Amino acid sequence: MARITYEQIKQSEEINTYIKRADIALKAMGYTEHSFAHVTKVASTASRLLLDLGYDEHTAELAQIAGYMHDIGNVINRIDHAQSGAVMAFRILDKMGMDAEDIAKVVNAIGNHDESTAFPVNEVAAAIIIADKTDVRRSRVRHQKEDELDIHDHVNHAVTESKTTLDKEKKIFRLALTIDLAESSVLDYFQIFLTRMVLCRKAAAYFGLEFQLVINGSTLC
C-alpha cells in the first residue's frame, strides 16, 4: 500500500472536479462558498491544530487530505453529504492505493463532520470539525444584492475579521470574530451557528481543550 500525500490529492483531477461541481450545486441552492478556498482553509487549520497539539506529521497530513475532500459528497446531494462524501473518498483513496488504516481515519473524519450526525470519533475527525465550523468569513458570501441575501449571508458578510488561535498553556481553542453589528446582530450569529459551536466544544473536548468564542472582544462561551 502507498503513502498518499496531500499534494497528490490536490493535484487529482477527479477530486478537483467533484469539489468544483459540488460547489456549483450548492451555489444553485443558495449556499455560501464551499469551493477551493473553503476546503484548503479547512485542510490548513486542521493540520496546524494537530501539529500544534503535538501530533505527528503523518496524522496532520491525513487531516489535510480529509479537509480537502470533506465536502465532495455535496456533488450527490446536500442531505447526508458527509456520509456520501466518505463513501466517495473511500473509493478514490482505495483506488489510489492508500493504506487501509489511513483510509479509515480519513473517511471517519469526512463522515463525521456535518453537525446533524457529527461526532469527534478520532483526532482527525475532531480537527476537521473545528476547522470546518470555524470558517466564518465575508468572502464566503456569493450574493451581492440586498434582496438576495438570507440570514446566512448576512451573518457571514458581517464578519470583518475572523481568527482562530490555540492557547496551549490555558488549553483553549479560540475563535475570535469582529462583527459589523450594523449588518448582523450577535443573536443572528447564534441563531445560525449555535449547533456548530456546540459541536466545536465537543470536538475541542476530545483534545482536552475548552472551546471559546469571542465576538467583538467579548467572550460569549
Image: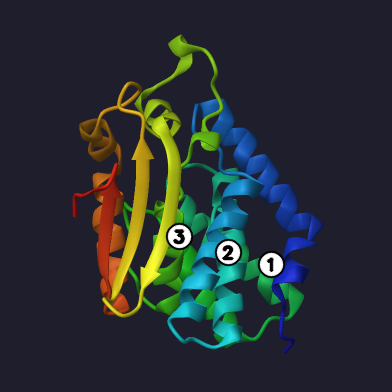
Q: Is residue 177 above or below residue 104?
A: above
Secondary element under disc 2, as helix, strand or loop, is helix
Residue type at mark 2: give it: Ser
Task: Return the disc, 2 or 3, that comes first in the chain's sequence.
Answer: 2
Task: Return the disc, 3 or 1, that comes first in the chain's sequence.
Answer: 1
Residue receiving disc 1: 92
Q: In percent of the image, x 74 and y 86: which residue is there? A: 2
Q: In percent of the image, x 32 and y 58: which residue is there? A: 117
Residue receiving disc 2: 44
Residue 33 horizontal/vertical position (percent): 56, 38
Q: Is residue 19 above or below residue 53?
A: above
| Spatial separation of the CA atoms under disc 3 and disc 1 | 23 Å
Secondary element under disc 3, as helix, strand or loop, is helix
Furthest residue in direction top, as rendered = 147
Residue type at mark 3: give it: Ala
Secondary element under disc 1, as helix, strand or loop, is helix
| Spatial separation of the CA atoms under disc 2 and disc 3 | 8 Å
Residue 101 horizontal/vertical position (percent): 56, 87
Q: Nearer the viewer, residue 210 or 18?
A: 210
Q: Which disc, if any, is residue 131?
A: 3
Task: Return the disc, 2 or 1, that comes first in the chain's sequence.
Answer: 2
Give the quadrant of the C terminus: bottom left
Q: Is residue 27 above or below residue 22?
A: above
Instruction: Tell us which disc is closer to us: 3 or 1.
Output: 3
Q: Is residue 206 visible?
A: yes
Q: Is residue 76 above or below residue 84?
A: above
